[in-house]
Image (cartoon, rainbow, N blue to C red):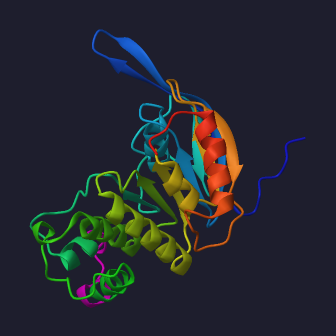
């Protein structure tokens, strides 16, 4: 008898595998037999070093890649391509250089035909939420790296997605700005609860943000090595003894960028 799925289950990955074909028709297995559940409003972090398949898994959940075997569902429905129910934030800022902050944040709503006054109201809400009030008329070249990434987060939230997918969004930032953005991400998530799948290679970042960490093996094809439930209250302190103990445990499991 098959068990009934959890009523709060948001994302389900079942035996997902993916192989990329390179020149000369050489197959490179990237992920293999990934089975994973993500609960509604959970902040899940997929943690692993470079070239372990974690970004490919995220792209499959986003509908940007198709698994060779297995499947992924969102609210019980198969994912067969990209959709507005998933907001995407990547390491590259991917902003429209010719649009202002307001223009970038409201772009998805504009493309969906939302009336101007309504989309401006929604966009302003998220601009305020990410701390960019007063920068609505600035262009991307006038913004710092952290500010650009906040525009990307606001744009993703403005489309009211069910799930936020973030692929190493702070990888290009300096250490101080990265820590600030981690705090901002936690604050925004507490304010606007959504299901989040966040990919990173940074242990400290994972421990600061996650409800649960999925640790990937450090080689291809990527497989899930271990799972850690982070039952610690927020806001968190990087120097807290429980964080340091978990950090040591995870560090002992694999080689990561600290």
Res 139 seen here: yes
Residue 139 spot, x, y in % from top left: 12, 73
Q: In which quarter of the image is residue 223?
A: top right
- Quarter of the image with the N terminus in it: top right
Residue sitting at x 37%, y 75%: 158
The image shows a total of numbered marks equal to 0
The percent coordinates of residue 227 (x first, y second) are 68, 44
- Determine the residue located farthest toward the top in the rendered image: 24
Question: Relative to the observer, which residue lies in front, 105 or 240?
Answer: 240
| x and y, in percent, of residue 187 in the image | 49, 76
Q: Where are the magenta residues, as a range? A: 108-119
Along the line of sight, the residue nearer the viewer: 34 or 205: 205
Residue 137 appears left or right of 220: left
| Left or right of 167, for residue 223 | right
- Residue at x 24% of width, y 66% of height: 148
Above-or-below relation of 66 to 144: above
Q: Where is residue 175 in the image (x, y as percent from the top left)?
A: 35, 58
* Residue 10 in sight here: no
For residue 174, what is the image quadrant? bottom left
Residue under the point 36% across and 86% down: 125
Q: Does the magenta stretch include residue 235?
A: no
Q: In this view, does 5 lie to the left or right of 102?
A: right
Residue at image coords 34%, 53%: 90
Magenta part, dominant SS = helix
Looking at this view, name the residue that lies furthest to the right: 1
Vertical position of residue 219 compared to residue 243: above or below: above
């Amino acid at each position: 008898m098959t068990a009934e799925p959890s009523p709060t289950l948001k994302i389900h990955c079942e035996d997902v595998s993916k192989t990329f074909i390179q020149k000369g028709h050489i197959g490179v297995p990237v992920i293999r037999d990934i089975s994973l559940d993500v609960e509604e409003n959970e902040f899940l972090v997929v943690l692993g070093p470079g070239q372990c398949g974690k970004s490919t898994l995220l792209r499959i959940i986003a509908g940007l890649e198709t698994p060779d075997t297995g499947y992924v569902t969102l609210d019980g429905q198969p994912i067969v391509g990209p959709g507005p129910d998933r907001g995407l934030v990547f390491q590259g800022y991917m902003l429209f250089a010719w649009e202002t902050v307001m223009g970038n944040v409201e772009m998805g709503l504009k493309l969906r035909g939302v009336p101007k006054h309504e989309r401006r109201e929604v966009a302003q809400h998220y601009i305020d939420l990410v701390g960019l009030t007063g920068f609505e008329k600035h262009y991307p070249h006038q913004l710092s790296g952290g500010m650009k990434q906040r525009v990307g987060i606001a744009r993703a939230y403005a489309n009211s997605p069910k799930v936020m997918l973030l692929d190493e969004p702070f990888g290009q930032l300096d250490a101080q700005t990265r820590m600030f953005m981690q705090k901002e991400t936690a604050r925004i998530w507490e304010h606007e609860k959504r299901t989040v799948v966040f990919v990173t290679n940074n242990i400290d970042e994972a421990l600061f943000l996650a409800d649960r960490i999925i640790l990937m093996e450090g080689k291809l094809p990527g497989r899930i090595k271990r799972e850690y439930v982070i039952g610690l209250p927020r806001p968190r302190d990087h120097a807290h003894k429980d964080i340091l103990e978990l950090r040591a445990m995870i560090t002992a499991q694999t080689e990561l960028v600290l």
